[in-house]
Amino acid sequence: WFPFLSDFGVIAARRTATVWVTGLVLEGCLEAVWAAHVVYARYRLIKLLGLGSWWQGYHRTLVLACILVITGVAMIGFFPWDAEGFSLVMHFWCANAVFYAGVYWAVGSAVLSWRMAREPALAHDAWPRARSAQAPVAAMAFC
């Protein structure tokens, strides 16, 4: 298990604040690049499969959740948890955005993937060996 930042103590957290902030901002940038590819690929699939305007709108809500997660990750380092007032409130806002929007993104993505997989154009799995190789990776993600 990775310890919480607070487990290092307040003094150690202040000494390494630049590393944490830089790492979180870089993580947010990498997530933004990844998300742009995922969002565009899903957009194209929804259009190609002709799923309709309801699923396009649903996809847009997932995009908003993704933006909240990325923004929360990139900004949380700027608002230390050990400060009172505005900084602590913003820290909790960022943390809640990452958690709740992340859960919505994960569940919503599963629902959207399930819906797209029901289309006849995607019913045949052209890569069964690749899918079977992904199963251990998915299992490890739950550990």
Image (cartoon, rainbow, N blue to C red):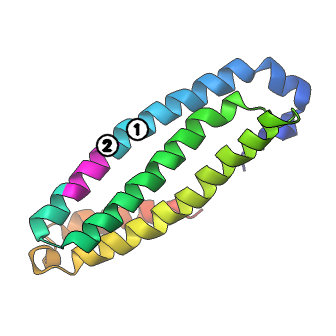
Confirm or deny contact between disc 1 and disc 2 (CB under 8 A).
Answer: yes
Q: Is residue 78 left or right of residue 45?
A: right
Secondary structure that dominates the magenta span: helix
Q: Name the quarter where the C terminus is drawn.
A: bottom right
- Please state which of residues 5 and 105 is positioned toward the viewer in this rendering: 105
Q: Nearer the viewer, residue 116 or 94?
A: 94
Per the rendered image, the range of residues in magenta is 36-43
Q: Where does the image place residue 113, in percent across and percent down from the top left?
A: 31, 70
In this rendering, position of residue 121 left or right of residue 94: left
Residue 11 spot, x, y in % from top left: 90, 24
What element does badge 2 sit on?
Answer: helix
Residue 96, x across and y down, in percent:
67, 53
Is residue 124 left or right of 106 when viewed as pictured? Answer: left
| Other residues around mark 2 within 10 Å, as few (<14) / some (14–19) / many (≥20) | few
Which residue appears at 78% of the width and 34% of the height? Answer: 87
Q: Which residue is mark 2?
A: 36
Asked if 78 appears above or below 129 in the picture, the reply is above
Secondary structure beneath dot 1 equals helix
Question: Which residue does the image show at 54% across and 57% down from the upper left?
Answer: 102
Q: Amino acid at mark 2?
A: Ala
**Mark pair 1, 2: CA separation:** 6 Å
**Quadrant of residue 20 in the image?**
top right
Task: Using the rendered view, name the quadrant where residue 52 is placed.
Answer: bottom left
The residue to which callout 1 is attached is: 32
Residue 59 tag number: none
Within-10-Å neighbours for mark 1: few <14, some 14–19, many 20+? some
Q: Nearer the viewer, residue 114 or 8?
A: 114
Is 33 situated above or below 107? above
| Residue positioned 82% across, 27% down in the render | 13
Q: Amino acid at mark 1?
A: Ala
